[in-house]
């Protein structure tokens, strides 16, 4: 997200400083493309995955389980690509999967924070998340070191650790909260957008 903001601000500054650009009707995406900025929409989910997430917007446990599933699928793809990391386009594909993993972890954490602030009972999903996230670190290290994706892997490892830490902390907090507030148990809270 910070990269997109920086690109947008730079494009605005560029547009403001060039008189012909300000008067043109050139769409900002074309300006950014000409300037060399990525046009990625940031969505690392397939259309089917997006629909599944939307369908479960009001079911916090199911939605979190979907993120766990999608993250696991990205890890499986990394494992499949890792043995042939140096052949063909595999380096770029591995880097892309690391980046998708990182973005999905970020989305998962955003959902966790939203559900937690709404006091949704997500203890079941958190239990699964704690178990699953404990395995992510090893799976992310399967691919051999390569400058083409080492930075993306480091970022993915940090995202995995952050998600794992948040899940463990939140699981403990939820246990304490729902022990004190028994009438809130098994409620969905408010779903994130």
Image (cartoon, rainbow, N blue to C red):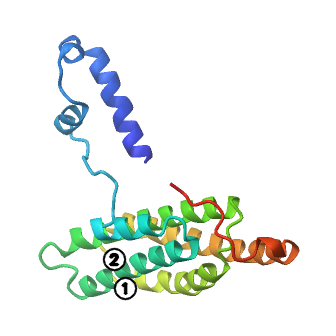
In the picture as drawn, the residue positioned furthest to the left comes out as 88
Does residue 63 appear left or right of residue 89 in this picture? right
Q: Is residue 147 visible?
A: no
In the rendered image, which quarter is residue 191 located in?
A: bottom right
Residue at (19, 79) in percent of width and height:
86
Q: Which mark is residue 98?
A: none
Name which quarter of the figure residue 87 lies in. Answer: bottom left
| Neighbours of disc 2 within 10 Å: few (<14), some (14-19), many (20+) | few
Residue 79: x, y in percent? 32, 86
Residue at x-position 78% and y-position 78%: 175
SS assignment at label 2: loop
Residue 145, numbered label: 2
Identify the element where label 1 is drawn: loop
- Residue 72 at least partly seen: yes
In the rendered structure, the answer to whether residue 181 lies left or right of residue 115 reads: right
x 33%, y 63%: residue: 44
Residue 13 in the image: x percent, y percent? 34, 22
Could you tell me if the residues under marks 2 and 1 are in contact, i.e. CB atoms within 8 Å? no
Task: Give the residue at x 28% y 73%.
Answer: 94
Which sits in the foreground, 178 or 77?
178
Residue in the foreground of this view, choosing between 53 and 157: 53
Real-space Cα separation, disc 2 to disc 1, in angstroms: 9 Å
Q: Which residue is mark 1?
A: 142
Residue that extends furthest to the right in the rendered view of this protein: 180
| Percent of width and height locating residue 93 | 23, 71
């Amino acid at each position: 997200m910070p990269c997109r903001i920086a690109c947008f601000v730079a494009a605005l500054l560029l547009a403001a400083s060039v008189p012909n650009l300000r008067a043109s009707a050139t769409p900002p995406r074309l300006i950014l493309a000409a300037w060399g900025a990525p046009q990625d929409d940031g969505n690392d989910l397939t259309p089917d995955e997006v629909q599944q997430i939307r369908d479960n917007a009001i079911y916090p446990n199911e939605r979190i389980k979907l993120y766990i599933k999608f993250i696991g699928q990205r890890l499986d793809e990394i494992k499949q690509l890792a043995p042939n990391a140096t052949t063909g386009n595999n380096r770029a594909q591995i880097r892309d999967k690391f980046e998708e993993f990182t973005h999905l972890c970020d989305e998962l954490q955003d959902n966790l924070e939203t559900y937690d602030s709404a006091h949704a009972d997500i203890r079941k999903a958190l239990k699964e998340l704690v178990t699953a996230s404990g395995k992510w670190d090893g799976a992310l290290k399967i691919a051999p070191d390569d400058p083409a994706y080492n930075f993306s892997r480091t970022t993915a490892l940090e995202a995995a650790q952050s998600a794992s830490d948040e899940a463990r902390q939140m699981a403990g907090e939820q246990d304490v909260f729902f022990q004190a507030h028994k009438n809130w148990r098994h409620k969905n809270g408010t779903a994130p957008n």
